[in-house]
Image: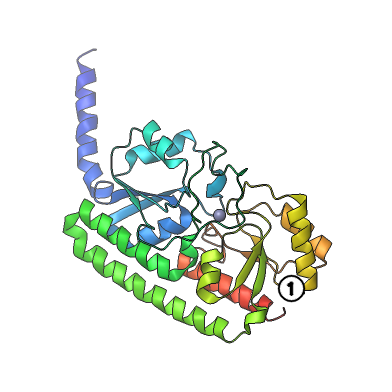
Amino acid sequence: MKLFRPLSALLAVLALALTLPAVAAERIPVLASFSILGDIVANVGGDRISVSTLVGPDEDAHVFQPAPDDIKAVARARLIVVNGLGFEGWMERLAQSANYRGPIVVASAGIKARERVGDDEEEHDHGGAHAHHGKDDPHAWQDPQNVIVYTRNIAAALAKLDPAGAEVYRRNGEAYVARLQDLDAWAARQFGQIPDAKRKVITSHDAFEYFGARYKVRFLAAQGVSTDSEPSARDVAALIRQIRSEKIKALFFENMSNPKLLQQIARESGTAPGGKLYADALSPAAGPAPDYLTLMRYNITQLLEKIRLN
Ligand SMILES: [Zn+2]
């Protein structure tokens, strides 16, 4: 009976050799840390790559806890793309656990980072590992001009990994850059029509500082730059007073943050929450923000509608 074993094993190997190249081996497996970045990577890579993400739609990267499947996804990848700026404090350990030896490209490399706001010494963010990841605000993707830098960094990293596709990545990247420029010009025109004094928005955590700087909108957040920070009762009370005295009507939940604190602020300030902004994650495919460009247009439309009432 022993004779049949090597034979069946050999047949299995042959069967694999016959089927695998046609399906799996053609696309390069690339792993992006979170859903928004995964969409940008997919736009640049086109059909030469297959993209998977660790932190999916409506999920919160600040408090991400890798599962055994995530270690497998990392081990399979030939390129990992991260946001950087301290957003993925868990990535280094995860790559080690998976024995990953490929490149890790930082999509935000070269952008002008903003400093964290509303941050204090007590805060330990990103996975609760008591690690402090610098003083940069990670939410750079909320400014389309930064995403142009992301796009070109990703195109360069893919070209290095797969030189035969370099021209495709460059072309895909520049086509995507053109769409980002359109988005940015449209957004600037829209906000330009609204008086400065009205451009005030309340959100759960400080995810919109880059956006606010780009389009001159003032975002006031209950929490600091990470969703796992705990604001003091005094800070919350001060925010409520400010909402009342400045009569701010634009108050938004975020798709991946706990709504409790914002509900409390809405109740105590007598303001009705205006809906949901997509901060650190896409929506599922059937939702209103399944890709980055749609996410931005959705957020901007929501924001414009409410700040007009301020
Ligand atoms: Zn965030």
Q: Find disc 1 in the rendering and name its residue.
A: 249
Q: Quadrant of ligand 1?
A: bottom right
Front one among 42 and 215: 215
Mark 1: secondary structure? loop
Amino acid type, callout 1: Lys
Q: Quadrant of residue 224?
A: bottom right
* Residue 300 shows in the view: yes
Front one among 24 and 56: 56
Q: Is residue 67 above or below residue 180?
A: above
Rendered location of residue 117, percent (x, y): 58, 58
Rendered location of residue 296, percent (x, y): 51, 70
Q: Is residue 117 above or below residue 186?
A: above
| Residue at the spot 29% in from the left edge and 68% down from the top edge | 172
Q: Is residue 68 left or right of residue 4?
A: right
Q: Is residue 33 left or right of residue 218?
A: left
Front one among 99 and 20: 99
Q: Quadrant of residue 48?
A: bottom left
| Residue at the spot 50% in from the left edge and 65% down from the top edge | 142
